Structure formats: structure tokens, C-alpha cells
Amino acid sequence: MADPAVEGKKLSRSFGRLALLGTLLAVAGLVGLVYTGVATLTSMLLFGWLLLIGGLVGLLHAIESRGTNYFWLGVVVAALNIAAGVVVIRHPHGTAEALTMFAALLFLTGGLFRLVGSVVVRGPQFGWTLLQGAFGLMLGLLVLFDWPHSSRYVLGLFFSLALLFDGLGLIAIGVGGRRIVSMVSEQQVAGELPDTSTGEDQNRSRS
């Protein structure tokens, strides 16, 4: 049977590593918020390599499953991922412009649908939905009016914010987990200590 104290220390170290990883992600997110152009280029190259590696892995799986009904479908999907990855890696700035335009259109359509839906339905969350729709519509218009210059910082800004919030979440989980493990360990130690108060009371009553 494993020692609870040893298991608690291992678990505490794991939560500590999780908090350290969160700190690194949060620092990377803060740096990306300062250098959004570098963050945009980095996110595009990372996206391209993920597509390329995913396509190669998918191609290997398709080759292993040759003779099945899904062989050619797997080959086509893998080839598309490989081609897209090569294009993104070779033309990161052009890809950033295309994805920024796509994001702007998503913000516009999403904000417009929320605005119209909130006005038509007028549910209990009317004000919040209206505010979300107006914010999405305004954000889409700002990105679209500044395009293609906005492609230099929009994706990097989103990428950096995602790193920052993910890092803060991991820090909260790691610190909270270590506190819980420490509290449980203290309770276990307190429960294992012998209770001598009863014996002392009996000795006093006898004397």
C-alpha cells in the first residue's frame, strides 16, 4: 500500500509543475501582447507546422489502412492538410491576411445575428445579448476597415490572449491543487497523532 505522505508529495509536485507551465504560458502571452506582429507570425508558422505534421500522420494511418473503404478519403484529407501546411509555412503573411478577413466576417455575422435575435426574441438576457451583438459587430467593422494592416496584429493579439488566459487558468489550478493537497496532508497527520488528553484526564481524576 502506497504511503499517503509520499503520494501527497508527488501530487504536490505535479501541481507545482502545472503552475510553472501556466506561468510560462502567461509570460509568453504578455510578451505576445507587446509584440503582436511577432506573435502573429509565430501563430501562423505554428499553425502551418501543425497542419503539415497532422497531414503526414494522417497519410501514414491511411497507408496502414489500405484496402479499406476509407483509404482514399484518408489520403485526400492528408494531402489537403499537407498542402495547406506548406502554403501557410511558405506564405505566413498572406495566410494571416486571409484568416483575419475570415475572422472579421465571423465577428460581423455573429454580431448581426445576436443583435437581430435579441431584438426579436427579447428574452431574459436581452441586454447582455444585445451588448454581445453590438461588441461583435463593432469589432468586425474595426478589423475590416483596417484590413490588411489589421492582419499584422489581430491574430497575434488573439493568440497572446489565449496563452495568457490559459496560463492564468493553469496557475490557479496548480496553486489551488497544492493548497488542497497540503490541507489533506495536514488533516491526515493530525488524525494519526495519538490523543493523550483522555489519558491525562483519567490520571488527574485518580490522583
Image (cartoon, rainbow, N blue to C red):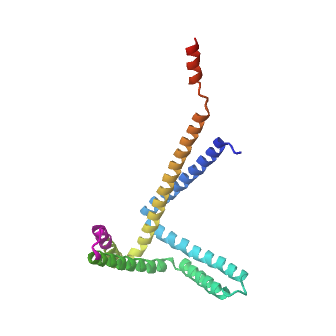
**In the rendered structure, does residue 125 fall within the stretch colored magenta?**
yes
Residue occupying image coordinates x 59% and y 47%: 12
Residue occupying image coordinates x 65% and y 79%: 58
Residue occupying image coordinates x 55% and y 15%: 205
Q: Where, quadrant-wise, is the C terminus in this rendering?
A: top right
Residue 163 against residue 116 in the figure, above or below: above
Q: Is residue 69 left or right of residue 45?
A: right
x and y, in percent, of residue 52 in the image: 60, 77
Residue 19 visible in the current orientation: yes
**In the rendered structure, does residue 1 fall within the stretch colored magenta?**
no
Residue 148 visible in the current orientation: no
Q: Which residues are magenta?
A: 121-134
Main SS, magenta region, reads: helix
Quarter of the figure with residue 206? top right
Quarter of the figure with residue 82? bottom right
Residue 161 against residue 146 in the figure, above or below: above
x and y, in percent, of residue 1 in the image: 71, 45
